[in-house]
Image (cartoon, rainbow, N blue to C red):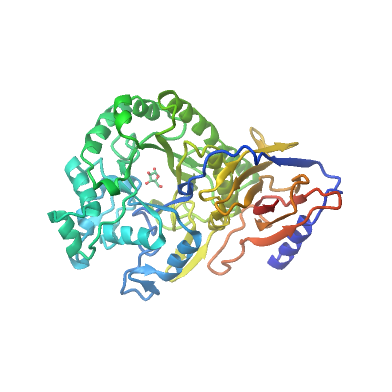
Amino acid sequence: MKFKSLLRAIGIALTITSTSSMAEVSVSLDTDNTGAVINKNIYGQFMEHLGRGIYEGVWVGPESDIPNTNGYRDDVLQALKDLQVPLLRWPGGCFADEYHWEDGIGPNAERKRTVNTTWGGVIDDNSFGTHEFMNLAEMLGADAYVNGNLGTGSPKEMAQWVEYMTSDSESSLANLRRENGRDKPWRLHFFAIGNETWGCGGSMDADYYVDLYKHYATFIKTPANNKPTLIASGGTDFRTDYTEALMSMESYWSYNKGAISHHYYTLPTSDWSKKGSALNFPESEWASTMSRTLKIEDILKTNIEIMDKYDPDEEIGFYLDEWGTWYDVTEGDPGFLYQQNSLRDAVVAALNLNIYHKYAKRVQMTIIAQMVNVLQAMILTDKEKMLLTPTYHVFRMHIPFQDATYVPIELDGNETYGQGEHQVPKINASAARGKDGKLWITLVNVDPNNDEVINLGSAYKRITGEILTAETMDAHNTFKDPNAVRPTSFEVSPAENGELVITLPPKAIIVAQLTE
Ligand code: AHR
């Protein structure tokens, strides 16, 4: 179906009223009993020295023919500004544990050329370093999250890096920063002590890491007005040993607050040697991707239960600082993790975000992996060309949820969609009261084949918002057709009986305002 006719189809679908004979899902919002604030950092982004994630993807250098501002490519910069990125994590990932910050400061010509042994064995000229990252975060108005090197660094190297970024004194390191062009310290919001220490960060046992964490963290010293939240590297998937071990440092937590990180990736097959294709996949892999995505809810619940045992006042955060889809690479060097991004990814993103909203009290940060050209990216580039992915559109549509207050939501009559063992609820939803006082709702129809009629009751005068859908499960944007998948606006008023009823097309995401 051509884009215009698709728009027509959506327009028609959304004006179907309650006279429809289809079974309905009734949605009710409990606006009197609001929940936690949905921390804006649930919408965090990640940039690692990996493939074209930074070089070409964000940073082209001031001499590049690609239009840029001080080395940051203009098209990507504008897209990130439009996305209102709240939080940026750098330099890894696995790369963080082989990154030595002094390689990436000072005049460009004098910076070291190092081998990226984690990702593709390529030479990194270190032209993107601490200044380039911290300035970018500042330009975007995003919180800065720097991941320290525990694996191949030392407590001294880590402590000095933090001093370099945050000290306002006349110390040699603060003065070196000044010589390198930055007078005032940057605001450092988050600092992590290692990454995936059970694997690429050092293959450690949880108990061993716990001691290292305390050791390194002791020497992170900053001015009182620039204290980063320290992040302990936690577990992955269904592992809980890290959460258990870290939470049991009770006397440490009693005088140091902080957070534990955790990672979870969605693989269609759950087999790391053959993860599944980003495009041209069978419907069975649509269903398995949806059900594996929803497993994050159990992961959150299990870890939160452990944390509640030790920290009933919920002072320690649980940060899911890597999540997203991970497929077999679409093209290029296998070590660069470049994959296309389709409507399936958009639905996956929306499902994840809805779950994070629900657990927002403890889950105060989540970071999709990664921002540009890597895994479930917001943006893809090909030299001077750039496109916004369906996942980008989902994040942009959800901006009103940043720092909004969670509103409990109930769905009645929600049927199941699935294939074989992979069965999931057809409709997935979330609601929140925005900072602007407006009431926002997201609705996702996971079923790739059938419409679903949604009855929102008679409390609302109107629903206005955006919808993202397409004809095929793997519909995606290309450099030739960068707008093949993009959101369109809609507005629906109540039927004569006062009920607000909309028909959600198959495989669609809505983010909309309910007028009370
Ligand atoms: O995001 C890609 C990689 O996945 C990160 O470097 C690592 O932390 C995780 O295993």
Quadrant location, ligand no. 1: top left
- Is the residue 222 above or below the residue 388 in the image? above
Q: Is residue 68 left or right of residue 164?
A: right
Residue drawn where x is 27% and y is 63% of the image? 127
Q: Quadrant of the N terminus?
A: bottom right
Q: Residue furthest bottom?
A: 65
Q: Is residue 102 left or right of residue 317?
A: left
Residue 386: x and y, percent? Answer: 48, 67
Q: Residue 268: in sight, yes or no?
A: no
User: Of residues 378 and 325, which is closer to you in this image?
Assistant: 378
Residue 455: x and y, percent? Answer: 77, 45
User: Of residues 193 and 38, which is closer to you in this image?
Assistant: 38
Residue 367: x and y, percent? Answer: 44, 47
Quarter of the image holding residue 482? Answer: bottom right
Residue drawn where x is 58% and y is 56% of the image? 397
- Is the residue 292 above or below the residue 163 in the image? above
Q: Residue furthest left?
A: 172
Q: Is residue 497 left or right of residue 403?
A: right
Residue 447: x and y, percent? Answer: 69, 45
